[in-house]
Structures are given as structure tokens and as C-alpha cells.
Image: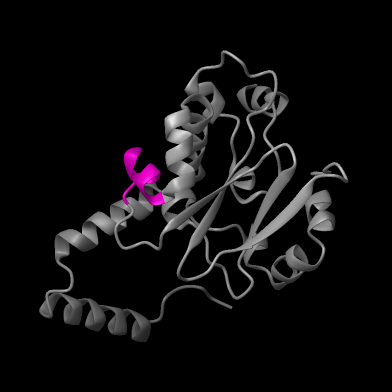
Amino acid sequence: MSHEPTAESLRLLDNLVAALKAKGICTEADLVAREESAGRASPEQGARMVARAWVDPAYHALMIRDGTAAAEGMGIRMAGNPPLGVLADTPSLHHLVVCTLCSCYPRAIIGYPPHWYKSSAYRARAVREPRAVLAEFGTVLPAAMQVRVVDSTADYRWMVLPQRPAGTEGWSEDRLAALVTRDHLVGVSLPSPQQGAARAA
């Protein structure tokens, strides 16, 4: 099955854009800014937010209180996107993000979702058997640790703020950001200093 847009879908898109412009809902500049913002979206943006939260308690508090404001404070354009919630892991609580209905995902922060995130198997099993799903990603949590599954929706997006790994004391913000991947930001895996070293090699 081809994922290329058809001539008819492109025509409908052009008509929609023309109607939005005619009604003053958006301008050409708005569309260009949104396209540029979408092009910059990648897990590195979320990683920078996490690293800042690990070294700056005030920013950590802002992320938990208002994820959208925290993203904008890092220069990430959030206009027109759903609010962003940030889920902070603790020594006794781990978060796992899923969208049970489709593939709602904080795209403005970490780009497009991976194929497995959109699969019906992940969406169903993450809710029914989250520990089994995590184990398949190599994440085995202590039995005493609570796993909280959080559902992203069309109205609210979620991202995980993982715990800072032990052994990273004194690391620079850039070095910390290099530890964080997309999988950490949705909670299927955990950052570690060893992983960062492997990525740098």
C-alpha cells in the first residue's frame, strides 16, 4: 500500500489551506513557521529539556507544572499544539506513555512516533501487561516499583522525565542530553551512563 499523497488529497489540502487563508484563520507566514517547526522536531529537543531539568531545579518544577511553557522556554514552538504534560519518574514510580485510540504523541517535542508506538499490539498490551512490554525493550523494573500507564489523547500529550542515572554527577548539560533517547521519553527504556558511552563511541 502506497503512502504517497494522491492528486485528490493534494487538491483537497490546497482547497483547505485557501479557505483558512480566506477566513483569516492562518496566513502564509503561519504555515511556513509550522512547517519549519515540524522539521526541527526530534527527540533531541526532549532530551535537552530532560537534561536541563536534571541540573536546574527551577526548570524541573516548571516542566512538571507546565510542560508547554517549559518547552517554549527552550525555544520550541508550541503554538497550535495540544498541552504537554510531563511525568516525572521517581525511585518508586515509573511511567509508560501510550495512545490507546490511535497514535497521539508529543510530535512538537520529539518528532514522529516510531512504528511500534502506533501498532495495535503495543497500544493494547501496554495497558494490559506493561511490565511484559517493558521487558521486551530490555527494561526490567523492581517488583516493588509501581508502573503507571498514561494515555495520550487528542487533547493532551505526555512525555516522561526519567530519573537522572547514578554516576553522572558533574556531567555537563550537553553530555547529559546525549544520554536521552526517544524511548526514554515515552518510558519504554531507561537512560544509563553506559548507553551514553556507547553512543559516543
Q: Would residue 152 be counted in the magenta stretch?
A: no
Q: Position of residue 163 (x, y in %)?
A: 64, 35
- Which of the 4 image quadrants contains residue 179? top right
Q: Quadrant of the C terminus?
A: top right
Q: Give the residue displayed 54% in from the left and 76% down from the top.
A: 2
Q: Give the residue displayed 50% in from the left and 57% down from the top.
A: 112
Q: Is 15 on the left or on the right of 62, as rendered?
A: left
Q: Quadrant of the N terminus?
A: bottom right
Q: Nearer the viewer, residue 184 or 143?
A: 143
Q: Is 83 on the left or on the right of 147, as rendered?
A: left
- Which of the 4 image quadrants contains residue 24? bottom left
Q: Position of residue 101 (x, y in %)?
A: 60, 76
Quick check: can you spot residue 195? yes
Q: Position of residue 88 (x, y in %)?
A: 59, 43
Q: Give the residue displayed 13% in from the left and 80% down from the top.
A: 23
Q: Is residue 32 above or below residue 125?
A: above
Q: Give the residue displayed 40% in from the left and 63% down from the top.
A: 82
Q: Position of residue 21 (x, y in %)?
A: 14, 75
- Which of the 4 image quadrants contains residue 74? top left
Q: Is residue 154 above or below residue 139?
A: below
Q: Is 74 on the left or on the right of 191, as rendered?
A: left
- Name the image colouring: one colour
Range covered by the magenta-colored residues: 68-77
Q: Is residue 200 above or below residue 25?
A: above
